[in-house]
Every structure is written in C-alpha cells, then in structure tokens.
Image (cartoon, helix red, strand yellow):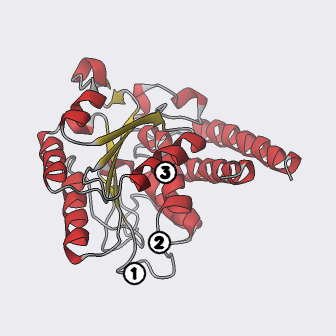
Amino acid sequence: MTKQEALQLKMTATRVRMGIIESTHGAKCGHPGGSLSAADVLTYLYFKEMRIDPANPQDPARDRFVLSKGHCAPGLYAALAERGFFPVQDLPTLRHSGSYLQGHPNMNTVPGVDMSTGSLGQGVSAACGMALAARTKGTDINVYTLLGDGEIEEGECWEAFMFASHYKLDNLCIIVDVNGLQIDGPTSKVMNSEPLDQKMDAFGFNTIICNGNSINELEQAFMLFDRAHGSGKPTCFLLHTTKGLGVSYMENAVEWHGKAPNDEQYQQAMAELRASYELLEKEVQRNV
C-alpha cells in the first residue's frame, strides 16, 4: 500500500467517524465510543480487504462480516454508507421509529448487513457457522467478525473459539477491539481477560497483536491472515485501540460507551473531525 492509499483510507475513516457522530446525535442515543475505536478496522475491511459489491449486496461469492458487538452499529452503518450500500444522508435516522437503521444491525432491512446481531457472543458463533459452511461447500469465502473486549466475558465466545479451532477454520478472522473499557468501567477491573494472546494461542489460533488505529499495522495484520490460509488455524487479531478516538472528550472516557452527544458536544466533535480531515487533505496534496 502506498502512502497516498494509506492517507485516503485515513480520510475515509475520518468520514466514518463523522457518520458515527451524525447518527448518534440524530438518535439522541447509541454507542459512539466503541464505534469510534473500531472505525479504522471497519474502513480497512470495507474499502481494502473484503470482496464485496454495494450494487449486489447479496452476491453469494462475497466475503462475510459479522458485527458481533452489535451495539456498535453506528460504526458499521457509517462504513456501509460511505461504501455506497445506502445514502450517508440516512445516518441521522438511527433508532428513529420507522427507520431501517435500528440500534442493532438487521440483515433483513439494512443492505450489506450479513447477520442480525445484538446479543453478545452470538455474532461470533454465527460467523463460525458461516466459515464452516463456506469450507464445506468448497467456496473461496473469508468470514470476518468484530468483538469487543468486554464481550468476550461471555462464555459463548469461548465455545465459538473452540469450535473454530476444532474445525480448522483458516478462512475465519476473529477481530477483538481491545479498547480496555466496557459499560461498567475498565475491563481489567470488571472482568480481567488478560493475557488474551496466550489464551487465543492456547485455543489454537494464529494470534496477531497490533495497533488497531493504524492503517499500516492493519495492512500487515491482514496480510498475515491471508498467509494463514491452508494452515488449518483460524486467525485472531487483538487490536489495541483508543475508545472514542477522534473526539477529544470521548477518548478513553467510559461514560461515552453508550450515550449520544448533545448539540454543543456534537458541534465540538464535528469541528475536531473536520479539522483532522483537512489536515489529511493537505498531506495528500503535499504528496501528489
């Protein structure tokens, strides 16, 4: 990936963050913190990694993505809208009565959503089933799923991890957003799951640790996933991220796990994100 390509992806991730703020402000509720921390990996998936077609969202040959931490739907919706699955202008209708963009992803109403999710732990289980189905049918389909580090307190996640290893699902990429915070506080205090790398290794995974807010490090991680095909080992990314990244007052602030910005906070957030976007634009122009 060239420097220009990386900059373009960073600009797209910034627009995704703007979409997260637009949607949660419009809803007057929602989950901005974990959506913002995952904006970079969602951008990389939808604009670089996955084989998808917004004009044909039900293409049987497409790669699949499951948002196991379904409460971070604002991040997924913003990425899908930027990718062209539906209009960006619809994002502020999040959670409104009659809107197709509800608080958790619905595969029956939202173009590009491959699995309805919300109950933590069930998304990764569904992703395992999709990966096994693809393998059984002999199709060249990759399945990606994004979990929260608080979500993996659910026992069902570890059942799914055991399943993935047992069936040698090397077409499966489990991505854990390790931002260190959940609704009740720091994950280290609520229910410490470390050392995650040793646990995933013990469950038979090809475990990769990286900065989940770095486009360049994400590229290296996905390259390692591609090389793992044929190994018989599923892959797990442990992405170290900053919850609320991109909006100063939301960063590493547990209270922004599940509340929306008011009008004044919305204006500040959008101003900060626009300033970041303009800096990236200038950097792109300097490197032309």
Q: Nearer the viewer, mark 3 or mark 1?
A: 3
Tell me whether circle 3 and circle 1 mark residues in contact (CB < 8 Å): no
Q: Is residue 93 left or right of residue 127?
A: right
Spatial CA span between label 3 and label 2 = 18 Å
Q: Residue at x 47, y 69 (%)?
A: 51
**Percent position (x, y) of residue 88?**
58, 65
**Amino acid marked by disc 3:** Met
**Percent position (x, y) of residue 197?**
30, 30
Tell me whether circle 3 and circle 2 mark residues in contact (CB < 8 Å): no
Query: Can you tell which mark lies on residue 223?
Result: 3
In the rendered image, the residue lying farthest to the front is: 231
Spatial CA span between label 3 and label 1 = 24 Å
Q: Quadrant of residue 57?
A: bottom left
Which sits earlier in the primary sequence, circle 3 or circle 2? 2
**Percent position (x, y) of residue 36?**
50, 42
Query: Can you tell which mark lies on residue 59?
Result: 1
Q: Mark yes or no: residue 239 visible.
A: no
**Amino acid marked by disc 1:** Asp
Instruction: Name the residue beneath numbered marker 2.
Output: 52
